[in-house]
Image (cartoon, rainbow, N blue to C red):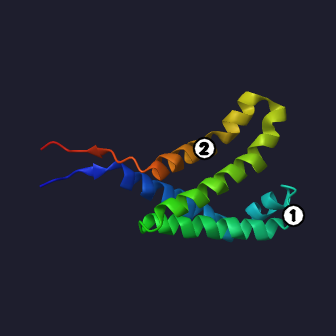
Amino acid sequence: MDRSISILKFLKYTIAFVFLTSGLMKLVHTELADYFMNLGIPFPLEVMYIVAWIEIGCGALLLLNKYTKLATIALMAVMIGAIILTKLPVLNSGVIHALFNARLDIVMLILLAVLYRNRVIIIKKTP
């Protein structure tokens, strides 16, 4: 009996979980609406809802293993936008502080890039 685990599949499910929960949080918690209002972007609430639905939709696509590349590209765009809008302004507090604040966004962007490249690694469990 082959009990191999696809790291790529695990990565898809993990990324899907992160974006599904992130999108749902944007829809149900009013604190995030206040956060978007303070970003200084036009139509902040509309942008927040668009981002939320992109995260939920693309997370669901990853979970269902459908249109993975397209979903990954959309989520990479969301992460780049998040870094530009929320992390670059922190640079005036220092590079280390900005990198610390951006660490999770950067990791998600890297994981999305790995998923996009579709490199499959198989770990076989020995009996």
Q: Position of residue 109 (x, y in %)?
A: 58, 47
- Dot 1 and dot 2 residues touching (CB under 8 Å): no
Q: Position of residue 71 (x, y in %)?
A: 54, 63
Say which label, 1 or 2, has the lower sequence index.
1
Q: Is residue 29 left or right of residue 57?
A: right
Query: Please, is residue 38 above or below residue 52 in the view?
Result: above
Say which of marks 1 and 2 sits in front: 1
Give the residue at x 47% y 67%.
67
Crowdedness near tag 1: few (<14), some (14–19) or many (≥20) residues, C-alpha within 10 Å: few
Quadrant for the C terminus in the image: top left
What count of labels does the image hold?
Answer: 2
The amino acid type of the residue labelled 2 equals Leu
- Camera-nearest residue between 23 and 115: 115
The amino acid type of the residue labelled 1 equals Pro
- Camera-nearest residue between 112 and 95: 112
Quadrant for the N terminus in the image: bottom left
Under circle 2, the secondary element is helix
Give the residue at x 63% y 39%.
103
Q: Position of residue 85 (x, y in %)?
A: 78, 50
Residue 42, label in figure: 1
Quickly name the residue at label 2: 104
